[in-house]
Image (cartoon, helix red, strand yellow):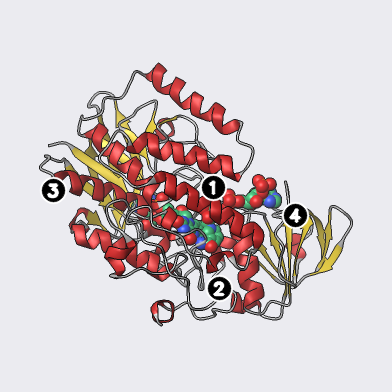
Amino acid sequence: MTRVAVIGAGPCGLSQLQAFRSAQKNGAEIPEVVCFDKQNDWGGLWNYTWRTGTDEYGETAHSSMYRYLWSNGPKECLEFGDYSFDEHFGRPIPSFPPRALLRDYIIGRAVKSDVRDWVRFAHVVRDVSYSEATAQFSLRAVNLVNQVDIEETFDYVVVATGHFSVPNVPSFEGIDRFPGRVIHGHEFRDAVEFREQRLLIVGASYSAEDIALQCRKYGAASVTCSYRTGAMGFDWPDGIEELPLVDRFEDSTVYFSNGEIREIDAVILCTGYLHHFPFLSEDLRLLAHNRLYPGDLYKGVFWINNPKLMYLGMQDQYYTFSMFDAQAWYARDAMLGRIELPAESEMRADSKTWQRREKALADPIQDIDFQTDYCKDLSESVDYSLDWDLAAENFKHWEHHKEESIVGYRNQAHPSPVTGTQAPIHHTSWWEAMDDSTESFLGS
Ligand SMILES: Cc1cc2nc3c(=O)[nH]c(=O)nc-3n(C[C@H](O)[C@H](O)[C@H](O)COP(=O)(O)OP(=O)(O)OC[C@H]3O[C@@H](n4cnc5c(N)ncnc54)[C@H](O)[C@@H]3O)c2cc1C
Ligand SMILES: NC(=O)c1ccc[n+]([C@@H]2O[C@H](COP(=O)([O-])OP(=O)(O)OC[C@H]3O[C@@H](n4cnc5c(N)ncnc54)[C@H](OP(=O)(O)O)[C@@H]3O)[C@@H](O)[C@H]2O)c1
């Protein structure tokens, strides 16, 4: 029997399991699917943990999520085509839920589809290599509970290990003598820790934006964000400012490249993450940074050198769960022989065409159109559908709302691209909502 290994039971891995279950329910014969995850539970990054550094098994702690994290995009831009928010919660809910509700939603579909038996939890994958002789992959994993190695062979491997877990940590002159805390966003857990402190945040993307707002919201004395390429440029609330890149630290004094100087108590490096696949042999390993169309992947999924290896969710992400589904459905149909992949030269040419378009993108609106077209391109060939144009409209409104008010965009409500339902407005403005519990969010 054909065997498929799925590495990771986060949103991408669960999309792959869902894709196979859905085909099976529709009468298809499916291969044996074995999913490995090093954590004790599914949900990937959405499994909040207080741990930083290493987990209970001595493996690197996976999650980069923190307390009080609310969705930073409208839920109507990530909704599953085959499992709506209305179905999960039994009623329409506001557009920007705290992370616990999104985790509940992801897992709700997996529970409904009864795919838990396919997952081997607390199994970290250590080595994957491909043999031309047998035309199979050999996979070695360790059962972290009893420390027993297992080695098995598979016909296909789907890598769904995410790329927002291994921090990118630059250094700055004098930072080794800075007297306060220096952490990466991956280790940030609770904004309350920085109450009354003067905070420096390095980076100018989503983590920098959200952690700056969080910390100020929960009582940081001031937040200075430092950018390398360009400022985020929002109309920040009082107490948050942006300066160009740090030049050097001298004790607790920070010098910026434009000559400005600030006294700082703590530093959070929001400098992004590395694509990191230490468990793959060199010939299978994707080299990429956080971009909309990573190299050497056909349809953003298939490893062109050996398309029996697939990667899910390796793109910079406007779309998340629904894009992962479209990728997983396409990967499934290739594995089931329903879609025939073209010759290598054609795959390379196709990938280059997307990358040329990616290179010409000039602003977030064009980025959104690009990723929408990508999702449509995948879903048109498989039995996965939602109103991608409405989702794209939601993203564009969201972009404008952010420009209008960086503390206010989460107070807006959007229509569902799956059911058409208009979300209600949340009962409390996000800037004032200190309680992110599910009861508080769903209440009144
Ligand atoms: C701080 C933060 C906030 C975010 N907020 C949002 C948001 O609000 N909305 C949104 O849509 N997206 C958000 N995202 C984007 C996020 O990338 C996706 O939502 C989603 O979690 C990606 O799913 P994934 O399955 O690719 O990866 P992950 O969620 O990272 O899951 C990967 C899984 O692989 C497992 N794994 C890794 N290595 C191994 C190994 N060697 N062996 C076995 N298992 C392994 C991990 O344990 C994990 O369970 C956020 C990301 C970050 C970092
Ligand atoms: N739900 C939420 O609220 C929430 C919160 C946080 C994060 N997220 C998600 O997490 C994911 C990752 O976001 P991210 O912001 O961590 O990563 P990211 O989008 O990849 O951005 C990395 C940032 O680090 C900067 N950087 C990298 N190296 C640097 C260096 N040497 N010096 C100075 N700056 C440097 C980059 O600057 P350049 O522009 O110069 O390259 C960029 O601004 C996204 O998908 C995001 O949506 C969501």
Q: Is mark 4 within 8 Å of ligand 2?
A: no
Mark before the other along the chain sequence, 1 or 2: 1
**Do we see residue 184 in this rendering?**
no
Q: Position of residue 19 (x, y in %)?
A: 24, 46
Amino acid at circle 1: Leu
Q: CA distance from mark 1 to mark 2?
A: 31 Å
Q: Could you tell me residue 310's position as x and y percent?
A: 35, 37
Mark 3 surroundings within 10 Å by alpha-carbon count, few (fewer than 14), some (14 through 19), many (20 or more): few
Image coordinates of residue 150 in percent, x first then y, are 24, 49
Q: Earlier in the sequence, mark 3 or mark 1?
A: 3
Please report contact status of discs 2 and 3: CB closer than 8 Å, yes or no.
no
Q: Nearer the viewer, mark 2 or mark 3?
A: 2
Q: Which residue is mark 2?
A: 430
Q: Quarter of the image for the C terminus: give it.
A: bottom left
Image quarter in which the N terminus is found: top left
Alpha-carbon distance for marks 3 and 1? 37 Å
